[in-house]
Amino acid sequence: MLLYSRMHIGRERGREVFVRVIAGSKKGIELRGGHGPFFRPTQQLVKESIFNTIGADIRGASILELFAGSGAVGIEALSRGAARAVFVEQDRTSLKTLRTNLDRCGFGPEAAVIRMGDALRYIERAAAQAQLFDFIFADPPYAAKTAAQRIVDVVGSAGVALCRTLIIEHANAIVAAEGGALELAKARRFGQTTVSYFTCRKEAAGGEGKGRALPGNV
């Protein structure tokens, strides 16, 4: 369910949700969202809050978006100056929507890579292969009650700092293991949604940030 305020933050045609890129080089471009009873997009108000929190750090950054859906978060990051983004999604309908949105914005494979597959398995393989990012975004389905905690566990127990910041949307409580690689920096609540920001105790070095290659077939 979308949140609405006095500003235009999203609209529906039939059962499909449409949102716009908020800021940056692709500001105002309308993105297809998704439809159906199990589709839950990142709320536009939540997305705006996330990028207000990140601020200028998004410029030149490398992004991993897990459970990417329509790709609205990763596309917003690219619009605001992120260098590269990897989108992980397993639903074929969502992948079609994601490709449509990237085409609308003119983001080709040099900036955006799509990986079809399970997000939890992807992050486990990324941890095993030390694939590094500046930001990891995750918005797992609320029906998958343990998915958010599993992502925190994998990133927090990795042998290297997989990211500088993990930003995860969740409904159920999640915690970072005491003494692990992650620590909770802040959390904000929007109705049933909580957005938690975890930082790695050691920043990723030599990863795939500015000017570095995207990961291979993880």
Image: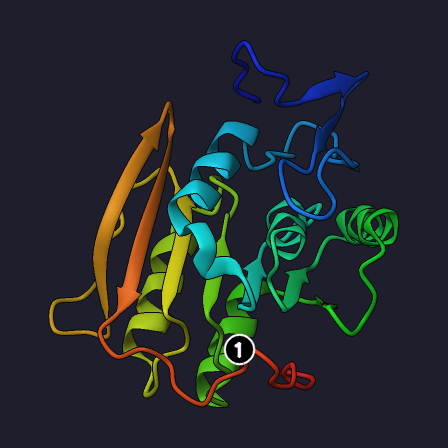
- Residue at label 1? 209
Choose between 51 and 218: the one closer to the eye. 51
**Three-letter amino acid code of the residue under disc 1:** Gly
Choose between 126 and 145: the one closer to the eye. 126
Task: Place residue 216 in its image quadrant.
Answer: bottom right
Q: Is residue 3 visible?
A: yes
Residue placed farthest to the top in the image? 6
In the picture, measured across the screen, residue 49 lies left or right of residue 31, that is left
Q: How many marks?
A: 1
Percent x, y for residue 49? 43, 36
Quadrant of the image containing the C terminus: bottom right
Q: Is residue 63 above or below residue 95?
A: below
Q: Is residue 161 above or below residue 35?
A: below
In the picture, measured across the screen, residue 202 lies left or right of residue 126, that is left
Percent x, y for residue 120? 51, 66
Quadrant of the image containing the N terminus: top right
